[in-house]
Image: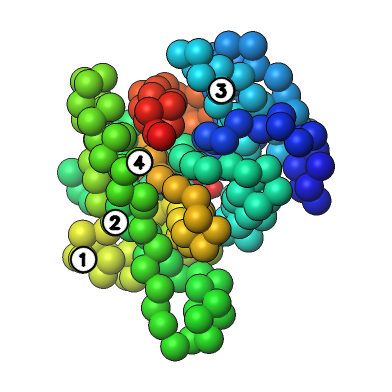
Amino acid sequence: MSVHIGAKPGEIAERVLLPGDPMRAKWIAETFLEDAVCYTQVRGMLGFTGTWQGQRVSVQGSGMGMPSASIYTHELINEYGVKSVIRIGSCGALAMDLNLGDVVAAIGSATDSNMNRSRFDGLIDYAPVADFGLLRTAVDTAAAQGVPIRVGPILAADAFYTDRPDLYDALALYGVLAVEMESAAIYTIAARYGAKALTILTVSDHIKRGEAMEAAQREQGFSNMVRIGLDTIISDS
Ligand SMILES: O=P(O)(O)O[C@H]1O[C@H](CO)[C@@H](O)[C@H]1O
Ligand SMILES: O=c1cc[nH]c(=O)[nH]1
């Protein structure tokens, strides 16, 4: 096992879906995967391996925020040989033409986190981006499934509750679609260690309109996104 994941070698597939919420990982495993087996319960951050369309896939909770997501992404790639990860998350919309339940794919991720500034000594504003192949497959997969998917940049924020909504307004002027809390770290760590990463999100809140899904919907109302994620990750070679 690694420091934070209790799996034995070989128990995690090379292709992993990464929801923030461990209970969403359980729901995905029980609802979509065949023969799913739980390989870790360390810190309650559940992980499962099963099959989708006959192909081995794991689904691992990654927690909230970039420090937590960084730990799981790092250990999956470096300790378990994971080759591709797709974050399956919820987000707060900034774009006025997005609605609750809409699906977004993050082509790139701006961030207010200091992690990458430290990484590059404050001298470079590194641009965390999705793997192009995974993104293209997700767009094609969504089209085949008849699910509209919006592709664009998002913000990975350190704080869920912000005192600076004016900064969100400014980002919206630059086409930033939505806010979540992990994508920039996942994209950066995957790039650093030679893995592929994509973030697909469902709009759970509209930040500007003050709309919000119920807690049960957040955990389980994300079937369209999960099917896109699963079909995309098994198509990856
Ligand atoms: O639904 P998940 O994947 O947890 O993602 C979003 O939800 C959490 C905040 O409620 C943050 O982790 C944010 O990124
Ligand atoms: O507003 C939101 C909704 C989900 N996740 C976030 O980080 N922010």
Furthest residue in direction front, as rendered: 237
The answer to whether marks 3 and 4 mark residues whose Cβ atoms lie closer than 8 Å is no
Mark 1 burial class by Cα count in 10 Å: few <14, some 14-19, many 20+:
few
Q: Which mark is residue 153?
A: 2
Label 4 vs label 2, nearer the camera? 4
Residue type pointed to by label 4: Leu
Q: CA distance from mark 4 to mark 1?
A: 24 Å
Residue picked out by circle 4 = 134
Q: CA distance from mark 4 to mark 2?
A: 15 Å
Query: Mark 3 falls on what kind of element?
Result: strand
Residue type pointed to by label 2: Pro
Label 3 vs label 1, nearer the camera? 3
Query: Mark 2 falls on what kind of element?
Result: strand
Q: Earlier in the sequence, mark 3 or mark 4?
A: 3
The quadrant holding residue 91 is top left
All told, the count of numbered labels is 4
Residue 223 placement (x, y as % from top left): 42, 22
The quadrant holding residue 153 is bottom left
Which quadrant is home to the N terminus?
top right
Query: Mark 4 falls on what kind of element?
Result: helix
Q: Which mark is residue 33?
A: none
Q: CA distance from mark 3 to mark 2?
A: 30 Å
State yes or no: Cβ of the residue under disc 3 lies below 8 Å from any atom of ligand 1: no
Q: Earlier in the sequence, mark 4 or mark 1?
A: 4
Label 4 vs label 1, nearer the camera? 4
Q: Earlier in the sequence, mark 3 or mark 1?
A: 3
Tell me the colour scheme of the image.
rainbow
Residue picked out by circle 3 = 56
Label 3 vs label 2, nearer the camera? 3
